[in-house]
Structures are given as C-alpha cells and as structure tokens.
Image (cartoon, rainbow, N blue to C red):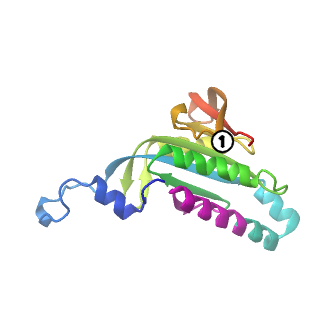
Amino acid sequence: MAPETTPAREWSEARQGSGSEHPDDLPDTAHLSVVRTFCFADLTGFTHYTRENGPHAAVSLLEEFRAVSRDVAAKRGVRVSKWLGDGVMLVGTEPTPSIAWGGHMIDHFGDVAELDLRIGMATGPALLFEGDDYIGEPVNLAAKLCTVAQPGEILASCEQDDLPAWIHVREVGKVNIRGVGAIDGILRLGVSAR
C-alpha cells in the first residue's frame, strides 16, 4: 500500500533541510517538485441523468460515486485531492495503486446501468503549489485524457510495468486532444475477468 499522501507529508518529504531552519534560511520558493500519479474520473451523462431523473436521484448517484471513490482510495493508499462536481481528482505517490483505483472503480460501476465512468491518468513530475495543489504537465494530461476517454475506459500515460496483474492493455496508441494535438504512447486499459 502506498504511504500516506497528505500535502503536509509531501512537503515534509520533499523539503530541503530539516524544517527547523531560521526563517532567513528557508528557500524562497513554496513550489516543490514531486513525482506523482494524477487520476481524474468523471461520471458521463450526469447532466442527462439529472434532467431525466431529477436532482434528488442525481444527488443519490453522486453520493454513491463519492462514497465508493473515498473507500477504494483509502484501501488503495491514494488520496482524493478534490471533488469536481460529478468528477474527482486523485493523487498517488506510486502509479500502481492509482491505476488499481481506476480499474477497481471501472469494475465496480461496470454493472450499474445508469452510471458510466471514464478515467484519465498520468504519472510524472509536478509542482506542489501552496501546499495542497499541483501544477504541471501530468496533471493537465490526466484531466484531458479523462475528457476524451470513452465510458468505461481508462486512458493512461504510464509504464506498462506499473500495471496491476489484473489490468491489461487493450491498445497502445495516439490520442488526439483538442488544443494539444496527438499524444503518442497512451495506454487504453481494461480490467481482466476473474
């Protein structure tokens, strides 16, 4: 299981020095470079579902999505960074538990008729900004991969060696992202049957 990934722990592990230096001796920047796996998941068709079933049914569906997201994240050792309406951003210190979170969620919600989930993820260096936010290419790429993923699909920019044994590569290829262009080497991931 991945170590705890609170912003305070990330700052502590990435800081230069002991943390007890005189104020004049601290670095000028509050931006630490960290390597993380960023994962975005989104409920597809949520607006249509709300229109068809009403806001109370939509809230119940959203409550289930958030409860399962939290529970699986806690079991996998990944951190829910922020809720994005009908989506979520997660951060992991290691890629494998983050990928496992995505596969777990796709597997869990695969049989829920009224819910489709799509996931984008990317691993790489980013800046830990103001102690609790992340800025950088892997964050942006993960968010954009989520927007172009098909319902029930995980699009990932990661190493195949980091995949859990029960997640397989359906395809490796290019993904066209509006405003960015073609990104090569993107993995389309699927969950293997037991």
Residue 69 image-quadrant placement: bottom right
Residue at the image point whose x is 52% and y is 36% from the top: 158
Count of numbered circles on the image: 1
- Residue 105 position, x and y percent, is 67, 53
Compared across the picture, whether 40 is left or right of 21 comes to: right
Q: Quadrant of the C terminus?
A: top right
Residue 130 in sight here: no
Compared across the picture, whether 17 is left or right of 164 comes to: left
- Residue 61 position, x and y percent, is 76, 66
- Residue 163 position, x and y percent, is 56, 38
The amino acid type of the residue labelled 1 equals: Ile
Q: Residue furthest right?
A: 52
Q: Residues within 10 Å of mark 1 (few under 14, many from 20)?
A: many
Residue at the image point whose x is 77% and y is 59% from the top: 47
Q: Main secondary structure of the magenta part?
A: helix
- Residue 95 position, x and y percent, is 50, 44
Compared across the picture, whether 190 is left or right of 82 comes to: right
Residue 165 in sight here: yes
Q: Please determine whether, in this image, residue 179 is positioned above or below residue 140.
A: above
The residue range painted magenta reads 63-85
Q: Please determine whether, in this image, residue 181 is positioned above or below residue 24.
A: above
In front here: 103 or 174?
103
Q: What residue is pinned by disc 1?
A: 154
Residue at the image point whose x is 61% and y is 64% from the top: 71
In front here: 13 or 41?
13
Residue 156 image-quadrant placement: top right
Disc 1 on helix, strand or loop?
strand
Q: Is residue 56 located in the magenta-colored stretch of the structure?
A: no
Q: Residue furthest bottom?
A: 56
Q: Is residue 67 located in the magenta-colored stretch of the structure?
A: yes
Residue at the image point whose x is 60% and y is 64% from the top: 70
